[in-house]
């Protein structure tokens, strides 16, 4: 059985778009994109959902501790080894106003995560797992998160080309989520259920090409 680690933030966790009047809600396992991936791949694959709300690529958030992906990726790989494929989809939270980084910096952080995967020896027979970098969909119309993510709409539109360059430099497989789905207009950050379905199918197609 092949093990796939899905390492991401609230859109991997399955957060339902927020209105500010409802408590935090999560899509059912079958609705979340890792669940769709599990369904599409079928038997012979074990999908590990490692999504955390607020997770960044490599940045420490003083307001939300324990969200630095760089600190948490290797323990996740070690926990679930041997890992055949690590799917990394992070970067949206790096665009928060408090961090003051641009798209190139965010992509560089994603590249550091790919380097951790490559040096982990957590694949079969202590090899490096394969990696798939997924660029998050651009930030949409902001309401609830308008102040926290000030300027993120514009910066997020530059993510895909920088992510593609980071993946190419490492000969890593790449999917631009924004080419297939869009962030919900409810909060501009999270994916709605149809977007999870579409993204899961697209990623499954890429995984088939990599692991078949």
Image (cartoon, helix red, strand yellow):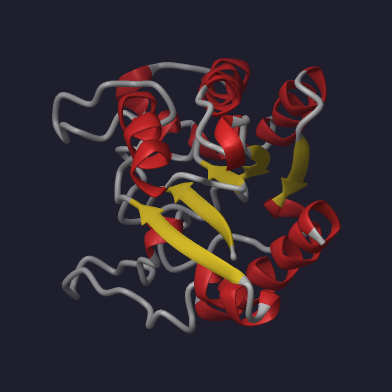
* Residue 163 rendering spot, x and y as whole percentages: 70, 29
* Residue 159 rendering spot, x and y as whole percentages: 66, 32
On the rendered structure, is 201 left or right of 149? Answer: right
On the rendered structure, is 207 left or right of 105? Answer: right
* Closer to us: 83 or 87: 83
* Residue 172 rendering spot, x and y as whole percentages: 76, 32
* Closer to us: 140 or 120: 120
Residue at image coords 30%, 22%: 98
On the rendered structure, is 20 left or right of 212? Answer: left
Residue 160, quarter of picture = top right
Q: Is residue 64 above or below residue 192?
A: above
Picture mark count: 0
* Residue 212 rendering spot, x and y as whole percentages: 82, 62
Residue at image coords 50%, 51%: 5
Residue at image coords 62%, 50%: 137
User: Can I make out residue 82 in this image?
Assistant: yes
Residue at image coords 51%, 75%: 35
* Closer to us: 171 or 129: 129
């Amino acid at each position: 059985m092949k093990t796939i680690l899905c390492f991401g933030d609230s859109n991997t966790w399955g957060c339902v778009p927020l209105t500010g009047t409802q408590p935090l809600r999560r899509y059912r396992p079958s609705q979340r994109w890792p669940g769709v991936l599990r369904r599409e791949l079928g038997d012979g694959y074990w999908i590990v959902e490692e999504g955390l709300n607020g997770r960044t690529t490599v940045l420490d958030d003083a307001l939300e501790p324990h969200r630095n992906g760089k600190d948490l990726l290797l323990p996740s790989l070690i926990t679930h080894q041997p890992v055949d494929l690590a799917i990394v989809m992070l970067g949206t939270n790096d665009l928060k106003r408090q961090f003051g980084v641009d798209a190139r910096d965010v992509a560089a952080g994603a590249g550091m995560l790919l380097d951790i995967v490559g040096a982990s020896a957590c694949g079969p027979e202590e090899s490096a797992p394969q990696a798939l970098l997924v660029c998050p969909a651009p930030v949409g119309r902001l309401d609830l998160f308008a102040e926290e993510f000030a300027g993120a709409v514009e910066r997020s539109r530059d993510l895909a080309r920088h992510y593609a360059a980071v993946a190419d430099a490492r000969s890593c497989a790449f999917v631009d989520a924004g080419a297939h789905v869009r962030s919900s207009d409810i909060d501009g950050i999270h994916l709605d259920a149809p977007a999870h379905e579409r993204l899961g199918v697209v990623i499954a197609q890429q995984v088939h090409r990599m692991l078949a």
